[in-house]
Amino acid sequence: MRNPRTTDLVARDLRHVWHPFTAHSAWPADEPIVVDRAEGMHFWDTDGNRYLDGVSSLWLTVHGHRVPEIDAAVRAQLERLDHATFLGLTHEPGIELAERLLASAPAGLTRVFYAGDGSSAVEAAIKMAFQATAQRGEGTPRPYYLHVAEGYHGDTLGAVSVGGIELFHATYRPILLDTRMVSSPGVLGPGQSRAQRAAEVLAEMRALLEVEGQQVCAVVIEALVQAAGGMLTHDGSFVRGVRALCDEFGALLIVDEVATGLGRTGRMWAVDHVGVAPDLMTCGKGLTGGYLPLSAVLATEQVYDAFLGAPSQGRTFFHGHSYTANPLCCAAALANLDLMAERGTVAHAARVGERIGELTKDLADYDGVREIRRVGTMTGIEVAAVGERTGFAVCQAARRRGVWVRPLGDVVVLMPPLAIGDEDLETLCAAVGESIREVVQ
Ligand SMILES: Cc1ncc(COP(=O)(O)O)c(C=O)c1O
């Protein structure tokens, strides 16, 4: 039974609100949850039901919700400076956060450009790559991007242009940038190993670059996991091979770490697993601990240098937003990074990942499960389709067990807050396992 407040809020929502990535014809029947409050690993709805946040509020939450230290940092910042434009001004939280991010970043990254969400970081990175290569004195600009099928980099038009998920991206194709796409290194042929697949896709990429390499300004990839593509994992040799191809053909390597970055894979950055240093790297999502929208592009000095020159030369990066580097967001991010360092959150996340592996081991043998893919805490359980929206039905069954998860098609995603404890993790894996067995028979 829903209480009158819930009924009223849902009715008003249905009347006026348009939700992201939501099929609105199905939304009313899905009985929307109205979130009222949150604490630690859980949130509560307006009927008082408690849910374990099994996907970190869409891959964001690090230490949990309402973390006293982050709350205090945002409040303290609020007492001092709410906002100041970053166009022509600067401030301490923005400066300090740049230093802190670079201290943990892959070798060679020396500059931080702030953006708002993951998509806007990718948008900035792809514009930077075009302009940097155009301004480095080669003569002819490089108008193409090379990217990967099943990739997802956000929903703004530049980010969509380098995406490769038919369902999300095909509609917009007539209005997108001109790009070249290779196959996904995570979609294996029959009997193929991930290493074989990586070699095959690298060969495909090389063939494209041999014809048009001088016109490609950047290759855009997610490292080790194509997350929104269905937690498709690939071999590390793919990332290393793309780095080598970029060097050979003079293209910049953009690694999008919006989903994988900041500990998600059990290392600070996914590229740390494979020893690859990108020219441009994006991050977002967990940057503020899951509190506030803030993302960043980290760039090498070489990329940055391409934008230098007398103002009259017009080499400036003409890009930025009203709320770029909002101090409240930066304060939350600094508090998040402090806690991550103090608590050893990245090492903990690696252990959480291992534990997810152990707790889902039995499920891997269940007939209704096609495959379980995981890197660190990023877990996708692909279930066999039994009618329409099987993944969604599994998540609804988990919801009845007090666990909130959200699928990618028929891939049930587990991505708990990095700091989750063993008891909650057991609850999460047990509820998802039972829900799969209930729905996929
Ligand atoms: C790899 C990657 N890049 C970019 C984005 C877009 O981030 P946002 O939703 O914050 O715009 C996402 C979102 O899931 C992502 O997974």
Image: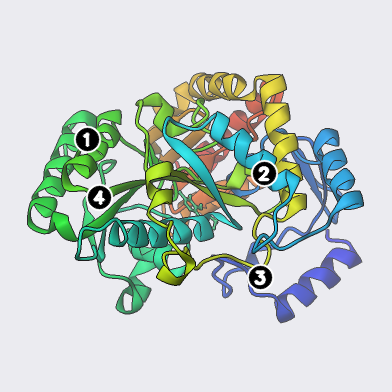
Residue 163 pos. (x, y %): 36, 59
- The amino acid on which the numbered mark 3 sits, given as a three-letter code, is Pro
Residue annotated with mark 3: 28
- The amino acid on which the numbered mark 4 sits, given as a three-letter code, is Ala
Label 1 near ligand 1 (CB < 8 Å)? no
Q: Which mark is residue 251?
A: 4
Q: Residues within 10 Å of mark 2 (few under 14, many from 20)?
A: few
- The correct choice, above or below, for 64 with respect to 385 in the image is above
Q: Earlier in the sequence, mark 4 or mark 1?
A: 1
Label 3 near ligand 1 (CB < 8 Å)? no
Label 2 near ligand 1 (CB < 8 Å)? no
Residue annotated with mark 1: 241
Secondary structure of the residue carrying tag 4 is loop
Q: Nearer the viewer, residue 239 or 54?
A: 239
Q: Which mark is in front, 3 or 1?
A: 1
- Between the C-alphas of marks 4 and 3, the distance is 47 Å
- Between the C-alphas of marks 3 and 1, the distance is 47 Å
Q: Earlier in the sequence, mark 2 or mark 1?
A: 2
Q: Residues within 10 Å of mark 1 (few under 14, many from 20)?
A: some
- The amino acid on which the numbered mark 2 sits, given as a three-letter code, is Ile
Location of the C terminus (image quadrant): top left
Q: Could you tell whether 341 is left or right of 118 in the image?
A: right
The quarter holding residue 2 reads bottom right
